[in-house]
Image (cartoon, rainbow, N blue to C red):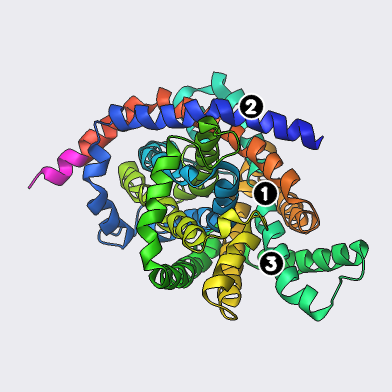
Amino acid sequence: MSEFLSSFSSWLWGNLLFILLGGGVFFTIFSRFSPFRYLGHGLLLLFGKYPETEAPGEVSHFRAFCSALSGTVGMGNVAGVAVAITQGGPGALFWMWVCAILGMATKFYTCSLAVMYRVKDQDGVEQGGPMYFILGGLGEKWKPLALFFAACGMFGCLPLLQSNQLTQIVRSMFFEPQGWFVSSVSMTQIGNALLGLLLSVLVGMVVVGGIKRIGAIAARLVPAMILLYGGTSLVILLDHADQILPAFSVIFSDAFTGQAVAGGALGMVIVTGVRRAAFSNEAGMGTEAMAHGAARTKEPIREGLVAMWGPVIDTLLMCTLTGLVLMVTDVWRSGEGNGVLLTSQAFEKSLPGVGPYLLLAGVLCLSFSSMVGFSYYVVKCGCFLFGQHARLPVLGFYLLTIIVSSVSTMAEIINFLDIAFGLMAIPTILASILLSSKVNQEARKYFNSLRSP
């Protein structure tokens, strides 16, 4: 099974490379770069410059943005970047940047559509996302595509990586030094399961309140974790300032040669970079559209502009910081450790004693916020498939997977998530391309209104 998952994941992402990059190029050109000219306006919207207190929706632009970031700014920025560099070499980071820039245009379209075609559910709550704009924009005959997205979303958004990686770092930093749950393989698994159970309970206490509580927690947690993790990374980079420019040189050279990868496989560098970028910033996957679809606004284009800042913060900032830390400390060449443990080595090397604990604090925030954010996506997909009465059973299933993933192996988790998550991009990109002219019409109206005196 592991071999099959690995082979299918490689085949799928080898083809999704063209869908995600091709979709991003299409949206960028089709929009004539107009959304990029209004990034400043999007930032003003994000910080409440134009409030719409009476507009439909559940949360403000800022809380919708933080809810989306809570799912994207997570272990993908710590463990995912480490996986990308060890599997694809430093050049993979360059292709993550490319994917992020193109992903900004993709997010503009998908998140604008999420607001344009949102509907009220059985409880009168506004719901938006790919499954809703597929149905509302393309019609009932496209319902199988909407159901396919929701089914993939129920599994692709499970918090398997977050729980697994958080369990690893807590075990290595606390359980093993204290001699807890390490006397045998079975005892190690018991310790992992207990930690997974604790995480499940804590996450459940937050997510049972729905998007309003998730948005409120995310609005506090996301800025704090960005400052903590980003600030610590900057301290390490300043301590290795003379290595920053050489690191960028290696990134750019390896991006087009693949020399750091076994066999010099350039294709592996590109595929790895695109795969990890998509998992990190979610542009084109559809999850971001589900979060932004809850924004309180009457103007779909406003939320599209706000959403464009997601890849900037997530990939261009946070992932870059992690990648540079791994490179300037030279731990990426060691071949020891995997995922978050490799990043932990970099923090220990630069900040002996205190570094791993600062990383642990950051990882706790990153993992917890992601597990909270992903719950909204899984529950939303489950309710679309089975109705609102399925909310609590689906939430219970979600919390159970936190425990299961804490005792699973990294390779199995990565491949399973990559397959389910990758399949979400097919209906999202396809429907967004078919409806892109509708977004352009709305965009012209909105941008013209901004230019009017």
Is residue 38 among what the camera can see? yes
| Residue topped by disc 2 | 11
| Residue topped by disc 1 | 158
Residue 62, numbered label: none
Nearest to viewer (mark 1 / mark 3) = 3
Main secondary structure type of the part rendered in magenta: helix
Residue 252: quarter of image: top left
Q: Nearer the viewer, residue 237 or 389?
A: 237
Q: CA distance from mark 1 to mark 3?
A: 20 Å
| Residue topped by disc 3 | 169
Q: Is residue 288 above or below residue 345?
A: above
Question: Can you give x and y, in whole percent of width and height, for residue 70 in the image?
Answer: 52, 58
Q: Residue at x 50, y 32 (%)?
A: 266
Circle 1 packing at 10 Å, graded few (<14), some (14-19), many (20+), is: many
Q: Give the residue type at disc 2.
A: Trp
Q: Is residue 400 above or below residue 132?
A: below
Question: Can you give x and y, in whole percent of width and height, for residue 131 in the image?
Answer: 55, 34
Q: Residue at x 61, y 66 (%)?
A: 345
Give, as a single range, the part of the protein colored magenta: 447-453
Q: Is residue 307 left or right of residue 373?
A: left
Residue 121: quarter of image: top right
Q: Residue at x 49, y 57 (%)?
A: 327
Is residue 210 among what the camera can see? no
